[in-house]
Image (cartoon, rainbow, N blue to C red):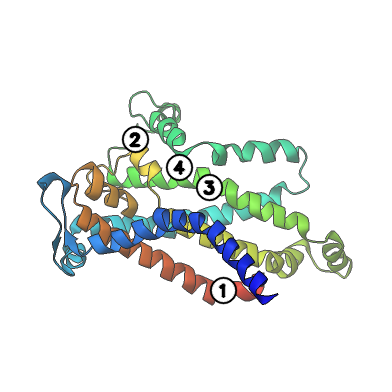
Amino acid sequence: MLSALHRRKRIGFFMVLPLLLLFIGLTVYPFAYMIYMSFHRYTLASWEKPEFIGLENYKEIFQDRTARSSVKFTILLLAVACPLEIVLGIGIAFLLRDFFGERTFRSTLLIPMMVPPVVAGIAWKMLFNFEFGPINYFLSLLGVDRVSWLGTQFFAQLGIILIDVWQWTPFVFLVIYAGLQSIPRDVVEASLVDGASGWSALRYIELPLLKPLIWVVLIIRLIDILKIFDLVYMVTFGGPGSATHSYSFYIYKVGISFGWDIGYASALSVILLIVVSLLTNLLIRFLRLREVLGL
């Protein structure tokens, strides 16, 4: 009996083995190779073999002005775009609930989220055009001078933030709106009958019930913004200068676009991976999401 069970387990293991090897080949090996290369000097343009240099690539990151600039811009995105998306998404979800024409508005609001970032980037690049862009045209109707949206540091950064908010606020709205539908209406109505105001019901009943969803959305958006690349690539290509270099875009620029410096790009990638992992774990622990979600 035991030998038959052992044989079935062995057969099951050999059946799963090809998938396991494929998983290791596609995920574990590239990850391990990236860490290995981060300790080497290896530039594709030089045709030389990788040279072990220890922590030199990591030391260089702290002396690299463009790397520091890309970190600042990524933090700016985290500090401005993420809170705006959360607040706007929650506000729209509450306003749209039980609103006349709710289905039509709901479908319309979801359109930006369904547009691929590359397409959104091209569309917004045309909208921001200095000479022929519709945004500057409407501003001129209001008596406002044309704005060089993609030519100055402030407006280029503002433009990336606006596009990210435009595209990902619907995601926050969708999650919170779905959460609102799951809150029993009789609980809210009972509090209103007991004399609570609409604001009190929202503050003390609905928002606390939505809190786990808000934290989950916050973590997803934080991770996504840390990896933002496509919008920057399509709209500003990191310019003007290095004003809109996100950290991910800088990794691409170092490793593929200009430098072909695989060793330094690997070190930058390892730092990003560590930051994302630490931030996610800290937030999960701080917000006690494991307990809330029963993980």
Task: Report how far apart the C-alphas of labels 3 and 4 lie in the structure.
Answer: 9 Å
Can you identify the residue that label 2 sits on?
147
Q: Name the side, left or right, on which 158 lies relative to 293.
A: left
N-terminal label among 3 and 1: 3
User: Is residue 99 depicted above or below 181 in this figure?
Assistant: above
Question: Which amino acid lies under the numbered mark 1 shown in the image of this protein?
Answer: Leu
What amino acid type should be assigned to the residue bearing mark 2? Val
Question: Residue at 89% across / 66% down in the picture?
Answer: 193
Amino acid type, callout 3: Trp
Instruction: Give residue 275's quadrant in the image.
Output: bottom left
Residue 122 visible in image: yes
Q: Quadrant of the N terminus?
A: bottom right
Going from the N terminus, do you reach mark 1 or mark 2 first?
2
Q: Which quadrant of the rendered structure holds the C terminus?
A: bottom right
Q: Amino acid at mark 4?
A: Ile
Residue 232 x %, y %: 35, 43
* Element class at badge 4: helix
Instruction: Name the residue tied to disc 4.
Output: 163
CA gap, disc 4 and disc 1? 28 Å
Camera-near label (1 vs 2) is 1
Residue on which disc 1 sits? 287
Pick whichever, 167 or 134, lies toward us.
Answer: 167
Q: Residue at x 48, y 72 (%)?
A: 281
Are dots 2 and 3 in contact, CB under 8 Å? no
**Which comes sooner in the sequence, label 2 or label 4?**
2
Q: Position of residue 10 (x, y in %)?
A: 57, 66
Q: x%, y% of residue 156?
A: 33, 43
Q: Which residue is mark 3?
A: 168
Of labels 4 and 1, earlier in sequence is 4
Determine which quarter of the picture holds residue 54.
Answer: bottom left
Dot 1: element: loop
Dot 1: within a 10 Å radius of its alpha carbon, few (fewer than 14), some, or many (20 or more) residues? Answer: some
